[in-house]
Amino acid sequence: MITVEHVTKRYGAVTAVDDVSFVCRPGTVTGFLGPNGAGKSTTMRMICGLTPPSAGSATIDGVAYRDLPNPGRHVGVLLDASAQHAGRTGREVLAVSGQLLGVPRSRVDDVLELVGLTGAAAKRRVGNYSLGMRQRLGIAHALLGDPSVLILDEPANGLDPEGIYWMRSLLRDFADRGGTVMLSSHLLREVEAVADHVVVIGNGQVVADGDKDELLAPGGLVVRALEPPALERALADAGVAVRETQDGSFTVDADAETVGRAAAAAGVVLLELRPADSAGLEGLFLSLTSAGATSAGATSAGAASATAPTEDKGEAA
Ligand SMILES: Nc1ncnc2c1ncn2[C@@H]1O[C@H](COP(=O)(O)OP(=O)(O)OP(=O)(O)O)[C@@H](O)[C@H]1O
């Protein structure tokens, strides 16, 4: 389990991370979402002991990263896929790390196989690798010590669609076997496809933290009638709060039977009764990371999904 408690990082006048707290639990994939410059990498570096926090603390299974004995056997980290020795082959990079970690030599072949860097690819110098191959090698490196926790900064960068699909399956499988996964991304679809739990960061602050399904939950029902004022009166009489939408329909937080009975009792003709569209994580992300939302501080999953815009501006993963 990764526990981040009131972590702040200041660089002079810049507060890169501002009082951030969240938990990543075993058996789950936590997506750490935020636009460029939001503070994702800085937070991950603090978790991994590479950047000292100005305040607060981060632990892995209750222990600070730098106090873990042989940390690579507990935590697999991929923060920068290009930070690998360009003159060594992929196999050599892993063999050197494997010796330091004290894993059996066969583990190097296992992880190369797992990430699809076999045959000639394993024998090629890392300097000649594509970005996608470096990401695969970085993921292999993170898995080498057979850790129970994975911390991956933008692992989908440079992967082709097949590679992205492969990575999602690998992370899902890792979590399903009880592992803890934290991955950052600015690609909302990427996180939506793989995460169970989502933490959204904007301007250094956590602006949403919750179960992905809760964040995506549709906001009640949409109901439309031939005579909207009559429907509004009928619903008010039944104690159902309504929100009027631009096209004259209403959004209600009630079940279909309650709405249908209220309309029937008042003789109101319904034209439409359906679940409201989910705002989608993308709308949530856009609304929560806007200047107004971030200054409002942390937002609960329910409130966040209720205030998200309904349009989908679409960013390809
Ligand atoms: N060493 C540093 N010195 C000064 N400012 C820094 C330093 N590292 C990060 N920052 C600033 O902290 C803020 C957060 O940066 P960070 O790299 O954590 O964001 P990010 O969410 O990972 O962004 P990206 O997706 O673009 O990598 C940015 O404003 C960045 O300029």
Image (spheres, rainbow, N blue to C red):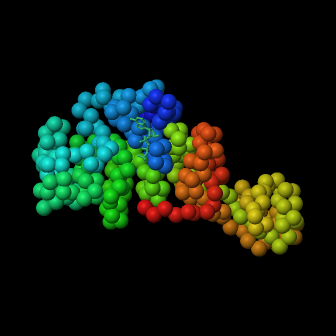
- Could you tell me if residue 109 is visible in this image? no
- Residue placed at 48% from the left, 43% from the top? 38
- Residue placed at 50% from the left, 38% from the top? 204
- Residue placed at 14% from the left, 57% from the top? 124
* Outermost residue toward the front in this view: 13
- Could you tell me if residue 54 is visible in this image? yes
Identify whether 211 is placed above or below 256: above
- Residue placed at 87% from the left, 56% from the top? 237
Residue 203 is situated, as x and y percent measured from the top left of the image, at 53, 41
Residue 223 is situated, as x and y percent measured from the top left of the image, at 75, 66
Q: Quadrant of the N terminus?
A: top left
* For residue 77, side relative to residue 42 (left or right): left
- Closer to us: 191 or 254: 191
Q: Quadrant of residue 2?
A: top left
> Can you tell me which quadrant of the image ligand 1 is in?
top left
Residue 128 is situated, as x and y percent measured from the top left of the image, at 18, 57
Q: Quadrant of residue 275?
A: bottom right
